[in-house]
Each structure stands twice: as C-alpha cells, then as structure tokens.
Image (cartoon, rainbow, N blue to C red):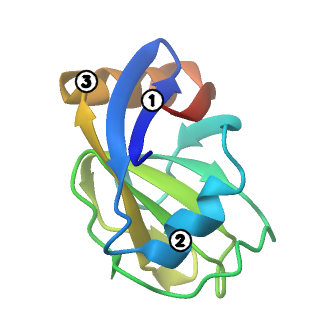
Amino acid sequence: MDKLKITAGDFVFTGHFETALAPQTVAAFRKHMPYRSQIVHVRWSGEGVWVPLGETDFGVGYENHTSHPAPGHIILYPGGISETEILLAYGGVDFSSKMGQLAGNHFITLTGGLENLPALGKSVLWEGAKSILFENA
C-alpha cells in the first residue's frame, strides 16, 4: 500500500510513501487519494514544480522536513509563513518563498522514471501548468 504511481503531464513515475519517516503527513495525504491537481514551475526555489494549495490545512506539523529535497523527493509544506504546497524536485532545490527559506515534509520518494524528471521540469517551465495524479500502484 506504500507504492505509488504518479502521472505528471506526459510522464509516469513510480514511488513510495515515506511512512516510517513522515507518518502523519502520509496519513493525511492518503485521505485525499487519488489526488489530482495541477503543477506549475517554482518561482524562487530552483528546479522544482509545485502544487499551490493556498490555505489548505492537512492538519500536520513538521516531520522529516528539509529545505533541500533531492531530485525525485516530494515534500509537503504544511503552511505557516507561506501558503500550503506540495513540491516535486527535479533538480537542485533550495526551498523558499517570497517570505524566505522554508522547510517541507519529505513524504514521497520517486523510484521509477527518474530519467524523465528534467524533461518534466522543462516542459512545465516552457509550456505551463500540467496535470498531476497520485494514485496507489
């Protein structure tokens, strides 16, 4: 049940929840599965795409949080000084907002399709928003 399929734009990735490291974030996100949204390119953080979630409250605090997710890591920023968001790193990321440095909960790691991450990022950067779907594999 920890295995995931993530379809982003024209690309399909596989991955898993980081249940042992971020149990509250994983449990909160699972309640929304399958999860559909749109990704747009990050503004300040570098090579990443994100799902802006405004005032959405997942009811979690910080756990397994980082400001520097590796390519293929997906983090949830639970809100606070900036809006709630989900971020997928496709390259180097220094997670920030117009308010400054942020940290998000690393709760999903992609394990398959990683070779397509740069192409996904570039397509979102140059072509605009793409759909994203998180579902159980």
Whether residue 108 sits left or right of residue 9 in the image: it is left
Q: CA distance from mark 2 to mark 1?
A: 19 Å
**Which residue matches tag 3?**
113
Q: Is residue 6 above or below residue 78?
A: above
The first of marks 2 and 1 along the sequence is 2
Q: Are marks 3 and 2 in contact (CB under 8 Å)?
A: no
Please state which amino acid type lies under the numbered disc 3.
Gly
Element at badge 1? loop
* Residue visible at 51% across and 64% down in the picture: 26
What's the amino acid at mark 2? Thr
Residue at image location 32% in from the left, 72% down from the top:
20
Q: Position of residue 76 (x, y in %)?
A: 52, 65
| Tag 2–tag 1 contact (CB < 8 Å) | no
Q: Which badge, 3 or 2, comes first in the chain's sequence?
A: 2
- Image spot of residue 85 (x, y percent): 61, 62
* Residue position for label 2: 25
**On screen, residue 36 above or below 18:** above
Task: Identify the residue shown where x is 57% and y is 82%.
Answer: 99
> Extreme right residue here?
55
Disc 3 element: loop
Spot occupied by residue 137 in the image (x, y as percentages of width and height): 45, 29
- Horizontal side of residue 130 vs 66, given as left or right: right
Few, some or many C-alpha atoms within 10 Å of disc 1 (few <14, some 14-19, many ≥20)?
few
Reading the image, the residue beneath label 1 is 137
Q: Nearer the viewer, residue 2 or 22?
A: 2
Q: Which amino acid is tagged 1?
A: Ala
Mark nearest the camera among 3 and 2 is 2
**In the image, which is nearer the foreground, mark 1 or mark 3?**
1
Estimate the x, y position of residue 116 in percent, counting from the top left. Answer: 27, 21
